[in-house]
Amino acid sequence: MSKFKRKGKGDMPAISTASLPDIVFMLLFFFMVTTVMRDSTLKIIVHVPEATEVKKLERKSLVSFIYVGSPKENLVPIYGTEPRIQLNDKFAKVSDIQDYISAERDARDEKEIPFMTTSLKVDEYTKMGIITDIKQELRKCNALKINYSTRKGEKTNN
Amino acid sequence: MAKRKPPEINSSSMADIAFMLLIFFLVATTMDIDSGISRKLPPLPEDQQENNDKIKERNVFVVLINKNNQLLVENEPTNIKFLKDKAKEFIANPRNLDNLPEKKETVVPFFGKYMVSKGIISLQNDRGTAYGTYIEVQNALAKAYNELRDDLALSKFGKKFKDLTTDKRKAVQKIYPQRISEAEPKNIGG
């Protein structure tokens, strides 16, 4: 009899928080794994144009990026203001694109190659000449799926 | 001698440390969804010049952009604001005009026989054209197609194009295929 009584009495047992760190660590690992660290530091200023008819870029692991824009302010004394191409971490010439694409292809599985996309992150004020050259290079190495990176914006009111 | 228990390390602050790390990663994670206008480049030409000649002039909607970012649409200087409507009129050819593209009767699932327009949009730009303008034009042309597809999908299925099932979407795409061709690079001057 007294056994039951004793149980009913007393304070509520405190909820053990011993497993709280585990839960938080689980979340932490999730975020650590899913975070995609920016793989290249941009040496150029890229302000992509706005567009309304955008599509999401799927399968991010299959996307290779080509950046085009004017060098950042601290690099202007060395490289000037002329728009340049950046592949990975360094400036490149148009002729380097084929090597870059084949290097990107080597890094992927063979059957994924047809789904690979090249994303062009190009500054708004770049002239089309350099982009036409890039497109010709991409056609030469048969990387035909491209994506003009844009921001989703309302500015274009047509 | 009394047995002394080793003192337990107080682990209650472990959660705080983990939280701090968690918050750092939460803040540092950029969930930026890369988006953009997808296009497919044509393969390099292999002597298919004669193929191009077959396309009649009325079936081609020529958009030229010069180095001053001005547009010449079907030989008329045009403001970019009107490009979308012009393109829409060209693709759909609602009144079957003679100077707008021909239509060819095609059997399309869900629609039966449908007059599909043969129109092609040809886009040419100068090397001096600004990329922003080029994207604006691409966007306007894509918008023309998307609006036409939406209109058709709404009138036929009562839903927007992007909400349709894959089969229906393919049928609508067959009626309004996105045909934007870009000329081989050359200097068209300004």
Image (cartoon, rainbow, N blue to C red):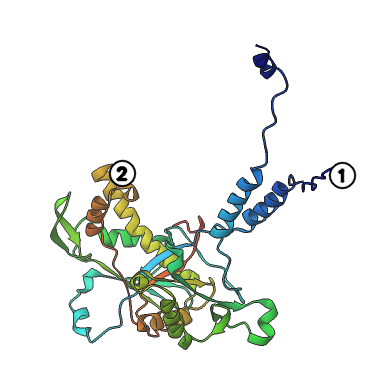
Query: Which residue is outermost to the right?
Result: B1
| Crowding at mark 2 (Cα within 10 Å: few <14, some 14-19, many 20+) | some
Q: Secondary structure at mark 2?
A: loop
| Crowding at mark 1 (Cα within 10 Å: few <14, some 14-19, many 20+) | few
Image coords of residue A88 (percent x, y): 54, 77
Image coords of residue B54 (percent x, y): 17, 77
Q: Nearer the viewer, residue B78 or A148?
A: A148
Q: Secondary structure at mark 1?
A: loop
Query: What's the residue type where badge 1 is placed?
Result: Met
Q: In this image, B10 relative to A93: left or right?
A: right
Q: Nearer the viewer, residue B95 or A88?
A: A88
How far separated are the C-alphas under marks 1 and 2?
84 Å
Image coords of residue A86 (percent x, y): 54, 79
Q: In this figure, which residue is indicated by the disc labeled 1?
A: B1
**Residue at point 24%, 56% (across, down):** B170
Look at the image and tell me whether residue B117 can be seen: yes
**Residue at point 22%, 69% (across, down):** B59
Query: What's the residue type where badge 2 is placed?
Result: Lys
Q: Which mark is residue B159?
A: 2
Chain under callout 1? B
Q: Quadrant of the N terminus of chain B?
A: top right
Q: Are marks 1 and 2 in contact (CB under 8 Å)?
A: no
Image coords of residue B138 (percent x, y): 40, 66
Q: Quadrant of the C terminus of chain B?
A: bottom left
